[in-house]
Image: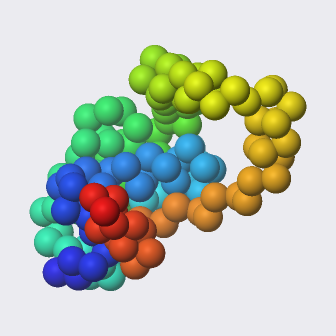
Amino acid sequence: MDTDNWSDSQPIYRQLRDRVVAMILEGALADGDPLPSVRSVAAEYRLNPLTVLKGYQQLVDEQLVEKRRGRGMYVSEGARRALLKGERQRFLEEEWPKVAATIQRLGFEVDELLQAAASAPPSPPTTLAPTRADAAGEENKGD
């Protein structure tokens, strides 16, 4: 297994699931798009096929992906909309209070924040396998 590509902080199947979710949110996978086959993901990233299947099964259980017998797995209709609703709510409940407290503590003005947001570089697109830089970032988190 290519352990350089995966963080030890959570199970690989969960990281795989989270990457597919990010791809749906970013529009890289749209409603009705096929997911890469379990076999191809397992071979390309040197994972046990059962690990890939477990990550995909979580998406099926969450009704974000549907199985089509003999054809594979496809992004469900409305998956992005459902994810956006849930992720926005989670952000407002869990992340925003911390962000808002930091903004107040540092005394930022609205104009400063808008300017910083406008000049921020775009995020790189998400793929199924993390980059080596992602893995290195995870390793350095405890430093």
Q: Residue 37: where, in percent of width, then height?
A: 34, 67
Colour scheme employed for the rendering of this structure = rainbow
Left or right side of 92 for 18: left
Left or right side of 124 for 70: left
| Residue 129 visible somewhere in the drawing | no
Return the residue nearer the eye: 98 or 143: 143
Q: Residue at x 73, y 30 (%)?
A: 108
On-image quarter of the N terminus: bottom left
Q: Residue at x 85, y 42 (%)?
A: 115
The outermost residue toward the front is: 106
Q: Is residue 68 above or below residue 38?
A: above
Q: Residue 58: where, in percent of width, then height?
A: 25, 42
Return the residue nearer the eye: 10 or 141: 141
| Residue 127 visible somewhere in the drawing | yes
Q: Residue at x 41, y 38 (%)?
A: 64
Q: Is residue 46 above or below residue 84?
A: below
Q: Residue 106: where, in percent of width, then height?
A: 63, 31
On-image quarter of the C terminus: bottom left
Q: Residue 31: where, in percent of width, then height?
A: 56, 44
Q: How many marks?
A: 0
